[in-house]
Amino acid sequence: MSARVLALLLDPAGAAGCLDAVAGACRALPGARVSGLHVRADPAGAIMPTEEVLTAERQAAMAAEAARGAAAIRSAWEWRRRAIPRRSPARRGRSRWWR
């Protein structure tokens, strides 16, 4: 039975370090399969009803910021995936990305 490694990619600033740790785990667990998980929260949920009015402009800005963060995390994921040699045990299996 092969091992499974789940990379929880929460923040663009920490994605590369997390993926480096995953690569290390794959070296220790030959044939491990890697999955990445990044969950984006609804920007409207970040505003408390008592705090401020969430204007359409502010909501759009928050959504754009979340999309930029997700794109940065995806970029780090793809960079790490391409950096692993094709014949490496860490590269076996399928690479997946969930939105």
Image: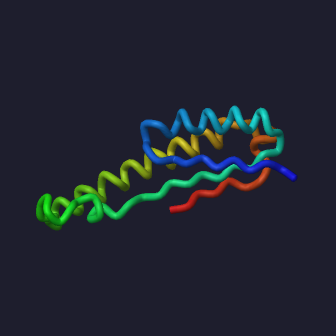
Side (left or right) of 54 relative to 19 = left
Side (left or right) of 81 relative to 89 = left
Displayed quadrant of residue 40: bottom left
Residue 51 pos. (x, y %)? 14, 58
Q: How many marks?
A: 0
Residue 34 pos. (x, y %)? 69, 49
Displayed quadrant of residue 91: top right
Residue 95 versus residue 31 in the image, above or below: below
Residue 59 versus residue 68 in the image, above or below: below
Side (left or right) of 94 relative to 68 = right
Instruction: Name the residue at the front extreme.
Output: 50
Is 85 in front, or is 41?
41
Side (left or right) of 12 relative to 23 = left
Residue depicted at x 54% and y 33%: 17
Residue 61 pos. (x, y %)? 23, 56
Is 50 in front, or is 66?
50
Residue 37 versus residue 90 in the image, above or below: below
Residue depicted at x 78% and y 33%: 28
Residue 76 pos. (x, y %)? 52, 41
Residue depicted at x 80% and y 39%: 29
> What's the colour scheme?
rainbow
